[in-house]
């Protein structure tokens, strides 16, 4: 464990991507960690990111030291037995939300934007 100065976003994601386990109370880590498939212990009792918890990639531990240590130990055993990445699917979607939104708007108005050929459309 290291105490470090704040990082730029690319440096932060690189650090997370090179981690085996994330323990944080940051809502950012609740998103990036599970998206990268890294087990994430969230030092909260509630989260505005329930998708990650429902996939099993993230776990709410609260701030109780015993709970944190027990959950970290369990996660480290899983990492030892199964590897440091969890492949349970993306908790926050498939990355095509923008294309779906544009397609839904175009469908509603009955036309596609002039540059629609550059996009792969998936109409809802």
Image (cartoon, rainbow, N blue to C red):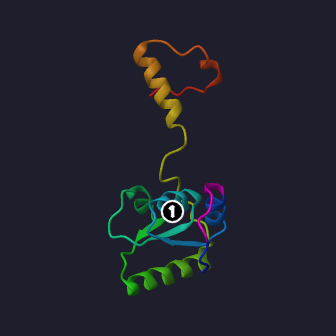
Q: Nearer the viewer, residue 77 or 101?
A: 101
Mark 1 residue crowding within 10 angstroms, few (<14) / some (14–19) / many (20+): many
Q: Nearer the viewer, residue 101 or 79?
A: 101
Above/below status of 60 relative to 81: above
* Residue at 44 percent of width and 24 percent of height: 104
Above/below status of 103 relative to 83: above
**Percent from the top left, x then y, of residue 4?**
61, 73
Q: Is residue 117 magenta?
A: no
Which of the 4 image quadrants contains residue 50? Answer: bottom left
Residue hosting label 1? 29
**Percent from the top left, x then y, of residue 109?**
42, 14
Question: Which residue range is magenta in the image?
Answer: 5-10
* Residue at 59 percent of width and 59 percent of height: 36
Work out which quarter of the rendered image holds the C terminus and state it: top left
Which of the 4 image quadrants contains residue 54? Answer: bottom left
Label 1: element kind: helix
Principal secondary structure, stretch drawn in magenta:
loop
* Residue at 50 percent of width and 84 percent of height: 73
**Percent from the top left, x then y, of residue 102?**
49, 26
Residue 34 is left or right of residue 67, and the answer is right
**Percent from the top left, x then y, of residue 57?**
49, 65
């Amino acid at each position: 464990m290291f105490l470090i100065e704040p990082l730029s976003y690319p440096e932060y994601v690189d650090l997370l991507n090179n981690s085996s386990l994330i323990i944080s109370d940051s809502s950012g880590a609740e998103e990036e960690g599970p998206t990268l498939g890294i087990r994430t212990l969230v030092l909260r009792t509630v989260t505005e990111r329930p998708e990650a918890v429902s996939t099993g990639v993230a776990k709410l531990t609260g701030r109780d030291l015993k709970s944190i240590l027990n959950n970290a130990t369990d996660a480290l055993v899983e990492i030892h037995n199964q590897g440091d990445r969890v492949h349970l699917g993306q908790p926050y979607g498939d990355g095509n939300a923008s294309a779906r939104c544009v397609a839904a708007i175009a469908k509603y108005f009955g036309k596609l934007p002039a540059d629609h050929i550059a996009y792969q459309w998936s109409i809802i």
